[in-house]
Image: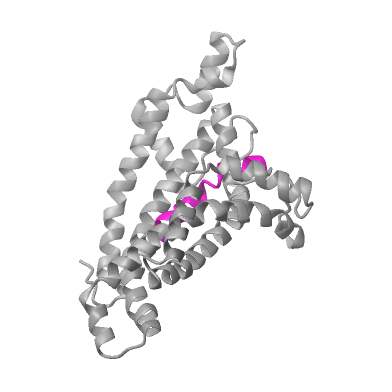
Amino acid sequence: MAAYFFQRLLQMIPTLFGVILLVFLLFNWVGGDPAYVLAGKFSNPEDIANIRRQLGLDQPLYIQFGIFLRQVLTFDYGLSWSTQEPVSHIFLTRLGPSIALLLPMLILETFIGIAIALAVAYVRDSWIDRTLTLTTTAAMSISLLIYIIVGQYFFAFVLGWFPVQGWANHGQSWLRYAVLPILLGLAVSLAPAIRLYRTFILEEMGQDYVRTARAKGLSETRVMLVHVLRNASIPIITNVLSSLPGLLIGAFLLERFFSIPGIGREVIMAVERSDFPVIKAITVSVATATMVFNLLADCAYQWVDPRVKLS
């Protein structure tokens, strides 16, 4: 396990280097000249030349790439072009609200989705299974925007159970503002999770080892919870861990409509303002997190099923 872990870490280095190089080329060639973006509409050549000198854009391309590589390694992307706030401070302060919103949503989605998927797989092809399949299909066809608009109107304006907007970084106030967006996000994400986990479980229920376990006289509950769920947990782990990098980019619509100061809202504002340092920091961070969580998923396979060999 340790040898495999360090081997994968070494393999991540050239991959991450390629991501950094690609981001650098895209923002320097496709994104246009940042000096013109910062100078604004009413600028003169002297202002543009001064901005290029301050940003190091008058240096050769390899020196500019070295500067960007140092920024990635030190997590110091300089100042935001729009707010003049350190990018690292923006990222760290906005990450908390996004995690506070999305992590409970992911945990609830996983456990509730697995429980419902096990239940409907146990009574597969019954009217309960068919009804749930139709319900989840209909739920997946509705946009998150509809859930947000209807949820805010009904639960906030009509019933007055939750506040529409606002956020606090500590204590009971945070929980008060987070409940409604978490419930609305869960309503959207739960339907595809149930369909996916149901497919994984049904695929395992058709295997020979399940028929052997039943032939030995094991109870259906033990067969489902011990044998079927354990073998179906590998693709479930893959799905859950592949969702974790999404915590770093937040929930765009939820954060925008509920005025949550998270990463998702910050990404939208950075794109609107052409705030390249913020966009580059989040892009590289998400790419790094994706590789790390993929490695953790591979290691988790052997923990769940020792028969899995990592090589």
Expressed as whole percent of the image width and height from the top left, the position of residue 154 reads 72, 47
> What residue is shown at x 76% (from left), y 58% (from top)?
173
> What residue is shown at x 49% (from left), y 48% (from top)?
138
Query: Is residue 87 shown above or below 243?
Result: above
Q: In which quarter of the image is residue 230?
A: bottom left
Expressed as whole percent of the image width and height from the top left, the position of residue 259 reads 69, 42
**Position of residue 241 in the picture relative to residue 275 (left or right):** left
Query: Is residue 78 shown above or below 98?
Result: above
Look at the image and tell me in which quarter the C terminus lies. Answer: bottom left
One can see residue 256 in this view: yes
**Position of residue 214 in the picture relative to residue 173 (left or right):** left
Q: Does the magenta stretch include residue 250?
A: yes
**Position of residue 224 in the picture relative to residue 276 (left or right):** left
Q: Does the magenta stretch include residue 219?
A: no
User: Which range of residues does the magenta coloring cover?
Assistant: 240-257
Seen from this angle, which residue lies furthest bottom?
217
In terms of depth relative to the viewer, which is nearer, 179 or 171? Answer: 179
Q: Check the image and tell me how it is coloured.
A: one colour
